[in-house]
Image: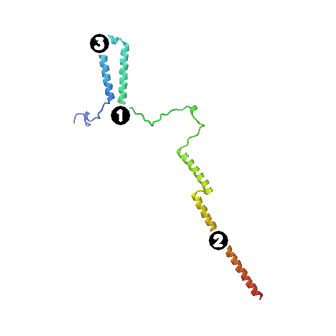
Amino acid sequence: MPKGGRKGGHKGRARQYTSPEEIDAQLQAEKQKAREEEEQKEGGDGAAGDPKKEKKSLDSDESEDEEDDYQQKRKGVEGLIDIENPNRVAQTTKKVTQLDLDGPKELSRREREEIEKQKAKERYMKMHLAGKTEQAKADLARLAIIRKQREEAARKKEEERKAKDDATLSGKRMQSLSLNK
């Protein structure tokens, strides 16, 4: 069995690349450590006796560790460019006193469209009743034609009835004349 087990050795692992910020942070940390070592060598025990310098160096080490952690958490291009989403709106909390309950309520898109549709229908019906729409004009023309046809039919019926009455009267006259003989 090969060295490292079945899965293979260290060469198959994912590679880790250091970002420029991490490199800068490491260089600064090395320079800081080198300065501290030089100060300790030059100052000897004198630097150890100054508690403020020790505190500053400890604080700077902790802050550098925090910066290193922060740098390691950022991935990809995030370390190079600070990007903030311009479309993101920060949510602000409102107090109860700031709420405007008496003001006009904003309608949803569907509600607005439904109200607009109803108003358009009402406008159309008013125009239709006034006879200003194309459909109303066509209906009125059709009604005029039907009215003329009915008048003609009524006139014909009247003429037929008169003709029938005349025929019956003339037939009765003939009968009465023939009976009178």
Looking at the picture, does residue 42 appear above or below residue 78?
Answer: above
**Alpha carbon of mark 2 to alpha carbon of mark 1: how far?**
90 Å
Q: Is residue 9 visible?
A: no
User: Could you say which disc has been placed on residue 153 in the image?
Assistant: 2
As helix, strand or loop, the secondary structure at mark 2 comes to: helix
Looking at the picture, does residue 101 appear above or below residue 50?
Answer: below
> In which quadrant of the rendered view does residue 99 lie?
top right
**Alpha carbon of mark 3 to alpha carbon of mark 1: how far?**
42 Å
Instruction: Kindly identify the residue that appears in the image at 74 percent across and 83 percent down.
Output: 173
User: Where residue 129 sits: x, y (%)?
Assistant: 62, 56
Between disc 2 and disc 3, the foreground one is 2
Viewer-nearest residue: 167 or 179: 167
Instruction: Kindly identify the residue that appears in the image at 54 percent across and 47 percent down.
Output: 113
Looking at the picture, does residue 16 appear above or below residue 52?
Answer: below
User: Could you say which disc has been placed on residue 77 in the image?
Assistant: 1
> In which quadrant of the rendered view does residue 2 lie?
top left
Give the left or right position of residue 49, taking residue 144 as reference.
Answer: left
- Quadrant for the C terminus in the image: bottom right
As helix, strand or loop, the secondary structure at mark 1 comes to: helix
Crowd tier of the residue under label 2, counting other residues whose Cα lies within 10 Å: few below 14, some 14–19, many 20 or above? few
Q: Earlier in the sequence, mark 3 or mark 1?
A: 3
